[in-house]
Image (cartoon, rainbow, N blue to C red):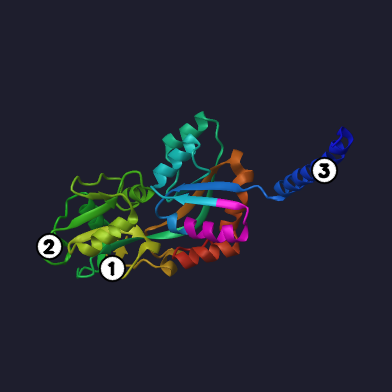
């Protein structure tokens, strides 16, 4: 075979290789780039964040949204460190947290996405069905230690709380305990689900949880903020009309630098469709 024939044979092969490469490049460029968004923080907001992320990814197949709990403090710290795009929180920013963001020159956007009624729960066998704010304060500061002191059975009170990194812990301390310290006997739990489980298994137990975590395994009690004149049970309706006294906003927080990245997800949370998810989960929509 002479050199001229070898050259002629090589031309079609090279042409095919070239066509294959062109086709591959065209295929790659057509694939949409994934938008990866991370949410971290409040266990109260967690079930809402997870459902919104799930529904959002069905609408936008180019998005990948990861949602992790751990507490409001954990989420805000991650936002400070730049290890999450959105912090989920069930409380406002503390002064020291605001200072950290200011030092880092971060412009934090704090968006209210829903409202929650904080439910005080006891074991279903407990006959006590209502407590005043003052009685709750005394239970959690250790002044009241037996259920007979509040009209119940002669049974030791076992009080459960969220751990200090939780926004629910902070909110309960400020709005129910009048900013007093928890007693050393109060048992701290790492997650809201753990409080539900512990209260359901302990006859003398009491705890507090977000409205969406209510189950038949625990009993919600009515609370009075007017020294026993009026008692109101936690519910979506009572939180919406503001008759239930232990209600609070829930937040998504993000650095404005990342606004272009997270805006479509936040806008979805605020949309009619996103607010419908709020109701489905068991929280109170904005409207």
Query: Where, quadrant-wise, is the C terminus in this rendering?
Result: bottom right
Q: N-terminal of the two: label 2 or label 3?
A: 3
Inter-mark Cα distance, 2 to 1: 19 Å
- In the picture provided, is 61 more to the left or to the right than 120? right
Tell which tag, 1 or 3, sits nearer the viewer: 3
Instruction: State left or right for residue 270 relative to residue 171.
Output: right
Front in this rendered view, residue 266 or 134? 266
**Do tag 2 and tag 1 residues touch (Cβ < 8 Å)?**
no
Vertical side of 257 occupied by 103: above or below: above
Name the main secondary structure of what is drawn in magenta: helix
Tag 2 secondary structure: loop
State the extent of the magenta-drawn residues as a range.
49-64
**What residue is drawn where x is 63% and y is 53%?**
62
The picture places residue 50, in percent across and down from the top left corner, at 48, 57
The answer to if 238 sits in the magenta stretch is: no
Q: Nearer the viewer, residue 176 or 85?
A: 85
Q: Residue 15 bears which disc, if any?
A: 3
Taking the spot 44% from the left edge, 65% from the top edge, the residue there is 282
- Whichever of labels 2 and 1 marks the residue nearer the N terminus, that label is 2
Near mark 2 (Cα within 10 A), the count class, few <14, some 14-19 or many ≥20, is some
Q: Is disc 1 surrounded by few (<14), some (14 to 19) or many (20+) residues within 10 Å? A: some
Mark nearest the camera among 2 and 1 is 1
| Residue located beneath label 2 in the image | 155
Residue 1 appears at what percent x and percent y? 84, 37
Question: Considering the numbered disc 1 on the image, is that residue within a helix, a strand or a loop?
Answer: loop
Q: Nearer the viewer, residue 210 or 260?
A: 260
Q: Please tell me the numbered disc located at residue 217.
A: 1
Residue 45 visible (yes or no): no
Residue that lies at the very extreme toward the right in this rendered image: 4
Q: Sequence order check: which comes first, mark 1 or mark 3?
A: 3
The circle drawn on residue 24 is none
Q: Residue at x 87, y 38 (%)?
A: 5
């Amino acid at each position: 075979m002479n050199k001229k024939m070898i050259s002629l044979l090589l031309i079609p092969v090279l042409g095919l290789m070239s066509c294959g490469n062109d086709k591959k490049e065209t295929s790659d460029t057509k694939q949409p780039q994934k938008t990866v968004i991370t949410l971290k923080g409040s266990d109260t907001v967690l079930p809402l964040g997870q459902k919104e992320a799930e529904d959002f990814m069905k609408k936008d197949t180019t998005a990948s949204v990861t949602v992790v709990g751990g507490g409001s403090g954990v989420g805000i710290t991650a936002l400070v460190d730049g290890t999450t795009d959105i912090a989920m929180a069930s409380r406002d920013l503390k002064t020291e947290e605001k200072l950290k963001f200011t030092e880092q020159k971060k412009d934090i956007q704090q968006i209210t996405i829903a409202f929650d009624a904080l439910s005080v729960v006891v074991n279903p066998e407990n006959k006590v069905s209502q407590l005043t704010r003052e009685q709750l304060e005394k239970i959690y500061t250790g002044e009241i230690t037996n259920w007979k002191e509040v009209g119940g059975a002669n049974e030791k009170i076992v009080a459960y709380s969220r751990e200090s990194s939780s926004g629910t812990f902070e909110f309960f301390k400020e709005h129910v305990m009048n900013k007093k310290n928890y007693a050393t006997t109060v048992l701290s739990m790492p997650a809201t689900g753990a409080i539900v489980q512990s209260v359901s298994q302990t006859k003398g137990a009491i705890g507090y949880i977000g409205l969406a975590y209510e189950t038949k395994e625990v009993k919600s009690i009515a609370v009075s903020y007017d020294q026993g004149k009026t008692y109101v049970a936690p519910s979506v309706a009572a939180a919406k009309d503001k008759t239930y006294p232990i209600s609070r906003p829930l937040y998504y927080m993000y650095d404005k630098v990342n606004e272009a990245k997270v805006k479509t997800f936040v806008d979805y949370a605020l949309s009619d469709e996103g607010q419908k998810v709020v109701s489905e989960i068991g929280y109170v929509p904005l409207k």
